[in-house]
Image (cartoon, grey):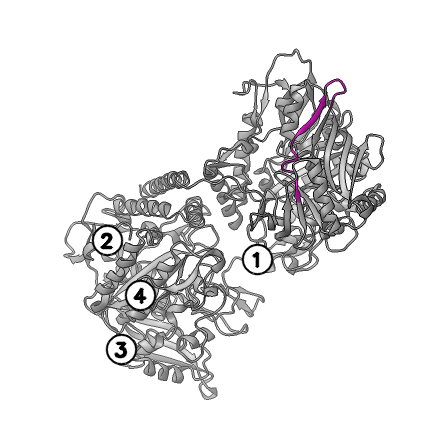
Amino acid sequence: MPLLYTNSVKLGILLRLICLFILSFSVCISTPPEDHIKCSSSTNTNCAITNSYGIFPDRSVCRAGSVAYPSDEEELISVVANAAKKKTKMKVATRYSHSIPKLVCPSGEDGLIISTKYLNRVVEIDAKAKTMTLESGVTLRQLISEATKAGLALPYTPYWWGLTVGGLLGTGAHGSTLWGNGSSIHDYVVGLTIVSPGGPGDGYVKVRRLNDGDKDLNAAKVSLGVLGVISQVTLNLQPMFKRSITYLSKDDSDLGDQVVRFGKEHEFADILWYPSQHKAVYRMDDRVSTNTSGNGLYDFIPFRATPSIALAVVRTTEENQESKSDADGKCTGAKLVTSILIKSAYGLTNNGLIFTGYPVIGYQHRLQSSGTCLDSLEDSRITACAWDPKIKGEFFHQTTFSINLSLAKNFIQDVQKLVEIEPKALCGVEIYNGILMRYVTTSSAYLGKQKDAIDFDITYYRSKDPMTPRLHEGILEEIEQLALVKYGALPHWGKNRNIAFDGVMNKYKGAKEFLRVKNVYDPMGLFSSEWTDQVLGLKDGVTIVKEGCALEGLCICSKDIHCAPSKGYFCRPGKIFNDARICFSLPPKDPIKCSSSSNTNCTITNSYGTFPNRMSKTKMKVATRFSHSIPKLVCPSGEDGLIISTKNLNHVVEIDAEAKTMTLESGVTLRQLISEGSKAGLALPYAPYWWGLTIGGILGTRAHGSTLWGKGSSVHDYVVGLTIVSPGGFEDGYVKVRKLNDSDQDLNAAKVSLGVLGVISQVTLKLQPMFKRSITYLSKNDADCGDQHKVVYRMDDRVPSDMSGNGLYDSIIFRATSPLTLAIIRTTEEIQESTRDAYGKCLTANLFTYLLINSAYGLTNNGLSFTGYPIIGYQHRLQSSGTCQDSLDTNTSCGWDPKIKGQFFYQTSFSISLSMAKNFIQDVQNPVEIEPKALCGVETYNGILMRYVTASSAYLGKQENAIDFNITYYRSKDPMTPRLYEGILKEVEQIAMFKYGALPHWGKNRNVAFDGVINKYKGVKEFLRVKDVYDPMGLFSSEWTDQVFGFKRGMSVVKEGCALEGLCICSQDIHCAPRKGYFCRPGKVSEDARNKET
């Protein structure tokens, strides 16, 4: 029953979040899809260009001085002449720019981009001669449509109709056949007009009109854009015909034997190969008589407009699978994708409406190509093409190459050998519909196919982080190198990463003749760029050797640093191809990582995977079991420190039921303490709400529960004995062991020490007899106490132990949660942040609050279900929780686990004296009146938790009775990206710290909270005296703790964007994000505050 309840809550949250997600889009203001060319002025100058995926293989930004949009050949000639006269570098850009490599980038930043967007007219159709003349910016879709009207058809084409004629020719794009003139569009070109630079005698421009007999046509019809701008193209077409298509799924065991025969048997054959599933889907596709009944349509499912929410879920799922190395999840997803596509005939329908069975028969123009996602309405991107970079959708690499028919069998068998070694390695490829195998033929084009071959098209996951390796990284790299090196494969000019083009010109017999034509057409190289010069072998540098270069296909690794050694990926020989060099995975598992078997030269991070200033590679000192402190308490100075983990100091030493004391080692968790205490009929009266903390960690950071009663809420105030191990001198054997009792003054230093006095070995706590509590949550308006103007009071008191009730507190927030659910929540939040969707945040906050209140925050009356208030139960069942730590499988985790895409947040936690709390609350309410939605983002993290704390005898404990305010809020993965309402949260933080002199929680804050903090403690001199006695050499101190104690400056890290991460309080605009519209300004309520105002 508890599991059922938990899952039902998760499902409810998931479904509601999806609804909210869609709603948040529907209320946004729509803008049309952005052009891939963007200029900073209305005069089309100072421009940047990318491709339709929003990124190039090397992730560089391609800039140009200006862009021109000629609308006819006369304007084009003028544009080229003017640029040639000025010796301006030029590049041609198509309407959608689907090429992955940097074909469109001119050299430098002052070049000219010539867009063919408006060269989009069909010039002439000669039905008798079966030819069509059209401008180079005409799309394949237009070509097909206009030819159809004349009863003509282009027999073989790419399957995506968003390409332009100029783009098709520039990259050698093709369909699939071994028949007739072959599958490449350029082999149906019978005429072509190209505009190139000229000399002064030519008016700085040359217009060449090439016909089928001109040898130069062999250069111009696959030119990579380095000869000039194609103005017009004449294609030889065929009379319209019909085709019959049947997909047949078979085992792939004989694929190598069948592949050549199958291509020769069927005119339009192709094969979809799913290697990890040992499956191949053969497309039996042939011409049939035009009087054969059928009006079939091919609307390929991956090319349809898709809901953005669905794309985001798919991408998020994939990111989670990658981060967790979840090969099983990928394989399950691959089988689902494959099953859906096969059962839906990949988008084929018999009549344009539904699929009723094979064969599907229809006219060529209805079956040869598709891409209806280009028809997406301007619907605030509710739907889009899957790879649209403006949404969270597909983000991938493509590796596409052709292997000679005579070698194809051996290559296929080599891939199958790799699958035998790593059976799940190619499931990630199958999520992208497997390996598409198309047939191509020898071409007369100098840069066309050299022999009849099979083209292998492989699409696979790409991380947003270029330094993050993929799951089974090495297998895909080995396949790539097998093809390119062992089998001499030719790369597709428009679908590859850099390494595919290294030395590629040596594979073309007509390379010298092509370069001769290039020198004639463009002797100054104005249409060349650094990238095309590298590809054509005129310059070195197509491979980029640097840290992590092999992960992105910028190089073939030769050193470990070219992979990701810090993430367990090292450069090793291939598994079956010894000449290959691949990034092989040896993932580290322990969060403490040491470079030797003797546990030396080590690193550690915290449970969130990052510190406030993101120096996650810093060497460290003492580490607790789960390391929940956000600041850098565990980091020693330098890189030669020693990590002392208390992971195995986890034993309860003694329980004295009569004295009501418990002695335990410092690595014992709060959960263990509570459990062992309850067995003896004892209880710790006040404790933090999260039971994953250790005793040493609790004392080191002054962790607490909530009360103003008795000795107070801080665990350290129940310490009556403590053993601490500190450095000693020669006469001490270099170590001192001090056993402190309740009467020792030094205990006031040791019980909240930030770990600078030594290592706590054992702790003795004073407990109380087990008791019962009664809890009721009451929701009220906050007028007498955000956007909700709501406060929830926890009425929580002791009751007689004979009162009926066996309540349990299993906080929903601390339960194990599906990574998919967490990823959807995080993705929703990221989108709301990037679109400045405060309305969406407030909707989410209202929903989240509603769910928590109605589920009593995880309280149940009997451990199974919540039936109503009050909840009565024993202390050990109500005081603390954290069942996400019980997750044993890979399908659930804690919300903040850095290995998944989950919560990523800041925490700002501070205590304000009771006498000032009212004024502070009113000061928070004031900016909410000004910006009513400003704190909705906090409410999505369950609002501001207010707990009561009392004055402590600890020198670094609470100085007076106070209220502790705990605020959790969104943190961007990009440290230079400001949050929505960045300034309001900063002002709240500064009002607390400076106006009200708040004391920061030692384990839950950013750097700015600790600047000058030591001056707020009356007992600081006594603490520092004890520190000098216990550790006179400062061996347990670090740069960070020295900064906290005021021995060193540097707690505030002043640099660009420092205020965004709480590393500094802004004093200049550059400390914020001026390029993103965030500037340093006085606070809205407190003039002394400095926030980021947008």
Nearer the observer, 968 or 117: 117
**Residue of label 1:** 567
Q: Which residues are magenta?
A: 114-131
Q: Residue 127 has which mark?
A: none
Q: Position of residue 392 (x, y in %)?
A: 50, 44
Q: Mark 1 Cα within 10 Å, few/some/many (few <14, many 20+)?
A: some
Q: Tell me if residue 882 is in the magenta stretch.
A: no
Nearer the observer, 455 or 934: 934
CA distance separating discs 4 and 3: 44 Å
Q: Tell me if residue 123 is in the magenta stretch.
A: yes
Q: Quadrant of the C terminus?
A: bottom left
Tag 3: amino acid: Asp
The reply to whether callout 4 and callout 2 are in contact (CB within 8 Å) is no
Q: Quadrant of the N terminus?
A: top left
Q: Residue 1086 has which mark?
A: 4
Query: Does dot 1 land on a helix, a strand or a loop?
Result: helix
Q: Position of residue 337 (x, y in %)?
A: 54, 34
**Residue of label 3:** 742
Q: Residue 791 has which mark?
A: 2
Query: Does dot 2 land on a helix, a strand or a loop?
Result: strand
Residue depicted at x 32% and y 83%: 1022
- Mark 4 or mark 3: which is in front? 4
